[in-house]
Image (cartoon, helix red, strand yellow):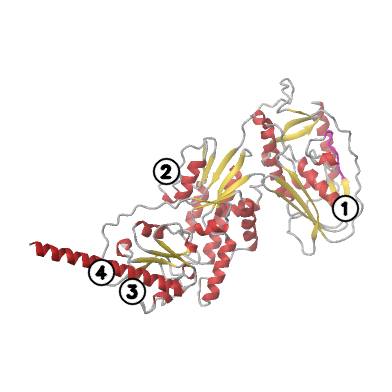
Amino acid sequence: MIFRGKSVLLQSYRFAVDAIDSDLKRHQCVGLPSGMALVASSVSDLWTETNSKERSLVAGKVHNIRMAVTKIHGVTVPAGTVFSFWKHVGRASRYRGFVEGRELREGCIIPSTGGGLCQLSNALYDAALKAGFEIVERHSHTKVIEGSLAEVGRDATVFWNYIDLRFRSRSAFYIEAKLTSDKLKVEIYAEKAKQKKPVELLRRSKAIDVLNSCATCGVDECHRVVTSGSGRGEFGKTAFLVDEFWPEHDDYIQDMRSKSDTLMIPIDGDRFRRPNYAWSTDGFARVRQSIFATAVRSYKSRKLAAQGASRQKNLLDSHRKLAEVYARRLSYEDLHVVVHQNLLPFLWSEGHLGGRTFDVLMTAFPMQEIQRRLDRAHSLHLESKTLADFRADQELLDAEAEALAHARKIITPHTGIAKIFAGRSETVDWQMPFVDNTDRMSNPKPVIVFPATTVGRKGCYELREAIRGLDVRLLLMGPIIESPDFWDGFDIGRDTANWLQRSDVVVLPAFVEHRPRRLLQAAAAGIPVIATAACGVSNVNGITTISSGDAATLRDAIRECLDKKSGEQKQLISEVVSQSIGSEANL
């Protein structure tokens, strides 16, 4: 009670003083200004517990730092003005999402809401000293925690709001603060100008030798005794964050989950009869749905065009909103995350994956790789109206690339994607469909099936060139987007009923293909398939793989398939005739 009473008085006094200080303000996050260079950095370990019983408190600390860095990352401070830790972070309350973490108070490590923020203030102080900034206010800890910056005198304790960290520079500076799975990294960028020698207004107090922790000391009568999760030996859960259903990823999740884990899905596909969200929900401690966000997305998607830049932008926006819903539901106990790729850049850029390990369920090529492939295709077909109609913002590309670089593991059935992440990828098997192939039709001339929309990225230009002059019928399984007259002069069909029974060969020479489900159907039915490595089915029997953009090789592969088909038919006819002659001779 005495401690709390003193704190209230000091907090009230500091609040009144700061209220009349016109120079003390919260600075804006405007991105790294031009002309600034890295002048200092500080890197420290997040997971510093020496006893497993403290892991809960350390996880709370990491969560609190994760919350705080979002308020500091990207701040630009003008020349001569003061940066204040509390002015930017604000009060660490449960209402704002902070949890119990490790706090050093009166000689003990205790559980406290917002505890652990001192690691961030330590890093800021360390970087500010290295940059030669003027230290306006800094307070040292009463004890030295092993592994902390206090061991080298680079610590700065903070306590809302009267124990603050404040510093300034003669030139403008910019702060970057990020968390990886196990590190806190603070960097300061500034204009190249000579700084003053740092001035510390408050000196270090004498460190106390004995260090007690509520998680391990065993003193039950203390008024700070831990009453919740901090003393548990086992701690840590996995959260699975998914979007549209992939059977291969569903099998993987069912193999990896434990009974304490959380599954976050758009909606329960089985309950609402939506097969595109039919994730298996059994065996999880919690299953969280995002029904409203999914309903809004579904409504908006009905109004979008089948192709084009506006569609892509709206899809990215819907992914961002779903990621935000999931992020609010992540617990500080979720130390590992398995996340669908389309949600990844938004969770990463907002800092929600910091201090956690994470794996990525890859459903597409990385966006930078997609754009590289589209640029190549466009260089081959400048007349295409679809190959250059959309490119994602560089900020989003960078966020995805950075997140993928920090991912522990990449899980995908797509062999083309897995090849990009060799060494970190885990290739799961494609789930082959069951196909009843008893009623194959006989065609007057060979039928080639193009199982895609007529757009440049699916290789329609290469296919058109490859079959030019061949006596074949082309069966199209999607709309013609490139131009209405794209297939003029070719024998084409648009009736896709019973397409498996009518197919002689299925061809997809795509530059980008993420869901080769029709190729898998054809392969399961024993139909010859020709596809590029970009289709990701190189490990499936019955599929011939070629390179993208090579019409000549595609033509040779098609001819080989048709010649083989023709030879098999002739052999079959010969066997039937021989059997017929033999039967007549016997009669």
Q: Distance between the residues labelled 2 and 3?
A: 46 Å
Q: Residue at label 1?
A: 132
- Which element is circle 2 on? loop
The residue that disc 3 covers is: 472
Give the residue type at disc 4. Answer: Lys
Residue for point 53% across, 77% down? 382
The answer to if 486 sits in the magenta stretch is no
Residue drawn at (46%, 70%) of the image: 459
| Of the pair 235 and 285, the residue shown nearer to us | 235
Mark 1 / mark 2, whichever is N-terminal: 1
User: Residue under circle 2?
Assistant: 271
Q: In the figure, residue 32 lies in which quadrant? A: bottom right
Q: Judge by depth and name the residue closer to the eye, 265 or 424.
A: 424
Measured in 3D between alpha carbons, the distance from the residue under mark 3 to the one under mark 1, in whole angstroms, is 76 Å
**Nearer the observer, 389 or 258:** 258
Q: Which is in the foreground here, disc 2 or disc 3?
A: 3
Q: Is the magenta stretch mostly helix, strand or loop?
A: loop
- Residue, far top: 221
Determine which residue is flagged by label 4.
570
Ranked by sequence position, the earlier of labels 1 and 4 is: 1
Q: Nearer the viewer, mark 4 or mark 2?
A: 4
